[in-house]
Image: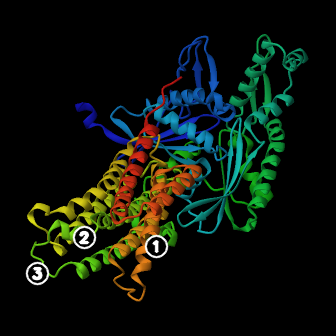
Amino acid sequence: MIKMALMDSATLAINIGMDGITAIAATSGRRTPLRFGDSNVLPAQVWQPHEQPISATPVNGATVIDVPDLLSTAPPDQSPRAVEAMSALLAQVAAHVPDVTTVGRLILALPDQWGPRRRALIRQAAEHAGLPTPVLVNTAEATATHATSTAPIEVGSSLLVCDLGNHASSITLLAREATGWRNLASIPAQATGAHLDENVLARLDFDDSLREQLTATTTANSSQARGQILAAIRTATATGAITRAAILLPEPYPPTVVTGAQLDAAAQPIRETTTAAARQAIEAADIDIDTIAGAIVTGPAATRLNVADHLARQLGITPLPTPSPELAAANGALTMHTSQNPPDTLGLLKAKHVGMRHLGAVATPMILGSILLLQIVTDARRLLPTTNYTGTYHLDELNAYLSINAYALTALCAALGLIAAGRIGAAVWTRHDHDNDTPGRHSTQAGRTLAAAAALGLAIAAMFGLLGETLFGTTDSTSGMFLRATILAALAPTVLAAAIGLLAPYSSRIRDAWADHLHYPATPVILAVAGTAATQAAAAGLPWLTAIDYAYIEAFGGRIGTGLLGVAIALTLAQTRLTRIGLAAVLGIGGVLVYGITNARLFTFAYLVAVALWWGAKAVRLIIAAVPRAAA
């Protein structure tokens, strides 16, 4: 425990490429490339022993799994295997972080073509490996960030990023913006090191019997010999600029030679393919080629293909120097996510263009609650016997002219408005993380936003109660009735909302979407307040519209109001459209039929209970969703 306490927290940036993995650990501003043996590149392979867990280290007799290829081709039913393989690979990378540090933050650079399904599998793999929730960035953007850190380009210009691998290549066109990069076009390119090796192999001079053996792809020996020669070609031509290089052939054949002219001839059609793909990306982006500030050419095959000079000659795009090209994506990923200042809630609300619809969800219950409170207070002050307000009202006097349940509803409205504000703030945090492909990064801030709003809602409800105690002082036996009523009305929604906000971020299963489940609709609130106001008017008359005959208000207002309360209860309790319609019809018609002052107040109380049950049901559903499913 003491050792762990003394450890520094490192930010680990990993570039997951189709041809291998590179990584950099950053501690206290110092970046350290991870070494895997004598190389900066870890082959993206794991081993699957027979009926045993996947291993990140070689196992005799085990099946070799190419992890990026598995992620690209695995069907949905093979997703657990892909997650296990990637988890083993990520754990292997993390094991190379110096043991004086712990991984406090994880940034993963992924190929641009990897979509939501594969990225979701990557996140699951990181969790299974015991690593923090990863920040995901696109490889092209990370590479561009690293290259332009030493050769900046102007905002508004574009950059061509060519990632040329041995097995997969891509051409991406990015636009430079004030806050980062915007992907204009990204297409796969059939220009790889494997194609170059095949082209060189076709030009080598060696024994005809060996050539016949290499074309006989049905035998294991021919496949092994072919793979051996292709690996030798890749090693001999690694520097790109060669005059002559020896290629070792399988026994008993003597070595052969590849010349610079053969290599250039083999690379020429691949360079043309790359140029054609670049033109296709420019056409897809629909931009003027003159706005492209430069080209970045990286990848294991980039040096051998010599694409940079070809692009300059054919398209007039100047290649940009890229320091440590094999570590460019990992370095750029670190740069993208280590210097950003954390946003604040108000700034996010402005940036996300929160509109009238969102403000209406906050303001509607507050405004309606205030109107109902004004009606109740006006009625009571108008009809109650005149006193000096020194605590001499008796409970019977209050009950005759004032519904404590209606008063409690006003406090609940205020609390619901503040909870809605907190939920919108939490949803904005979640949207910010989603837009930046960093799900869960600010889940704690989102939860605290909701919890703070809920706590404020409970405090406001208590203030409503104290206001009632001040306006309508009661005898000692009933003192505190307003405070108790308002706190109890708002207690369940506010406490449950605060608990969800504080606890939900700790569950990786729901921390990205819990705020979306807490939207309490405005319609039941509107109906409940309108119904309560109507029943209050039927019981005490209208304090303002005195021109309306009270007999009509008493005859129709109370029944309609109780019916509206019944519909509000139904909309709150029922979850499906069919059950809402059925229950709303039963409670609405029932409310009209059973109207009486006492029953109307019971319907208001029933609505308060329904809201508490709604929040309780939401909490239970989130708990169920947060619990990991047992493996079948």
Say above or below: 545 vs 326. below
What is the crowding at mark 3: few (fewer than 14 residues within 10 Å), some, or many (at least 20)? few
Q: Quadrant of residue 348?
A: bottom left
Residue that numbered label 3 is attached to:
388
The front one of 3 and 399 is: 399
In the figure, is residue 52 to the left or right of 401?
right
Mark in front: 2 vs 3 = 2
What is the crowding at mark 2: few (fewer than 14 residues within 10 Å), some, or many (at least 20)? some
Question: How far across and how far down the image is residue 176, in percent?
Answer: 60, 63
Task: Answer yes or no: is residue 574 visible.
Answer: yes
Q: Could you say whether the residue bearing mark 1 is in a helix, strand or loop?
A: helix
Residue type at the position of mark 2 = Ala
Q: Quadrant of residue 269?
A: top right
Quadrant into which the N terminus falls: top left
Say above or below: 569 vs 472. above
Say above or below: 68 vs 441. above
In three-dimensional space, the C-alpha distance between marks 2 and 1, rounded to whole angstroms, equals: 20 Å
Question: How far across and how far down the image is residue 264, in percent?
Answer: 80, 41
The front one of 14 and 193 is: 14
Say above or below: 224 vs 605. above
Q: Could you say whether the residue bearing mark 3 is in a helix, strand or loop?
A: loop
